[in-house]
Image (spheres, rainbow, N blue to C red):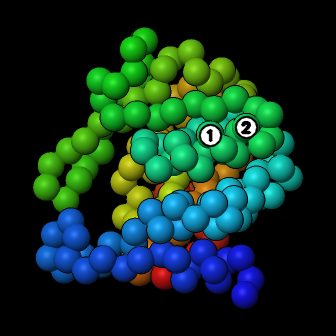
Amino acid sequence: METIEKIRAAIRDVPDFPKPGILFKDLTPLMADGSLLRGAIGLFVDACRELRPDKIVGIEARGFIFGSAVATALGCGFVPIRKKGKLPWKTHGKAYALEYGQAEIEIHQDAVTEGARVVLIDDLLATGGTACAAIELLRETGADLLEVQFLVELDFLEGRIVLGDVPVRSFLHY
């Protein structure tokens, strides 16, 4: 079986999580399998290699898992985008809407310099709110955002539309 299909088979559907009516895509079984985790990271590495980024930016928390491994494989820097109040230095922040309220993410002001070639990585694209806020943060830094990459995209939620004109790559579609 091809790697991508093995990865798909390992993703567990969890009904009614985190609330009734949601079918959650649980990636932890694939992350628990060393071979599948290596395969998933390999998908990102192969896609990023051709883009030649200076930095990989990962969104908290699962974007850290994939993004830091990709940065290590490529020999480039890794930059975390975290929930408000979790970074210890001067930050840029961006608030965004959630279904029942608001959240905010932050990036260190000196983490990405103007013109730096970056790829933004996260595990899953759903409605696109968090990724859109991350894109706006990176634009504020002056970064050259090459692409946004996700292991999984829930196409029916149309999160890609919210991301605008940024190139988006997803390896698995539901």
Q: Tell me the kind of residue under disc 2.
A: Thr
1 over 168 or under it: above or below: below
146 over 13 or under it: above or below: above
Residue 128 x, y percent position in the rendering: 41, 59
Give the camera-side residue of 75 and 140.
75
Give the camera-side residue of 76 and 26.
26
Can you tell which quarter of the image residue 6 is in?
A: bottom right
63 over 35 or under it: above or below: above
Separation of disc 1 and disc 2 at Cα? 6 Å
Q: Tell me the kind of residue under disc 1.
A: Ser
Tag 2's secondary structure?
A: helix
Residue 31 seen in this snapshot: yes
Left of 132 or right of it: where is 120?
A: right
Dot 2 corresponds to which residue? 72
Residue 61 x, y percent position in the rendering: 42, 44
Disc count in the image? 2
Dot 1 corresponds to which residue? 68
Q: Which mark is residue 92?
A: none
Q: Residue at x 86, y 52 (%)?
A: 50
Q: Residues within 10 Å of mark 1 (few under 14, many from 20)?
A: many
Q: Are marks 1 and 2 in contact (CB under 8 Å)?
A: yes
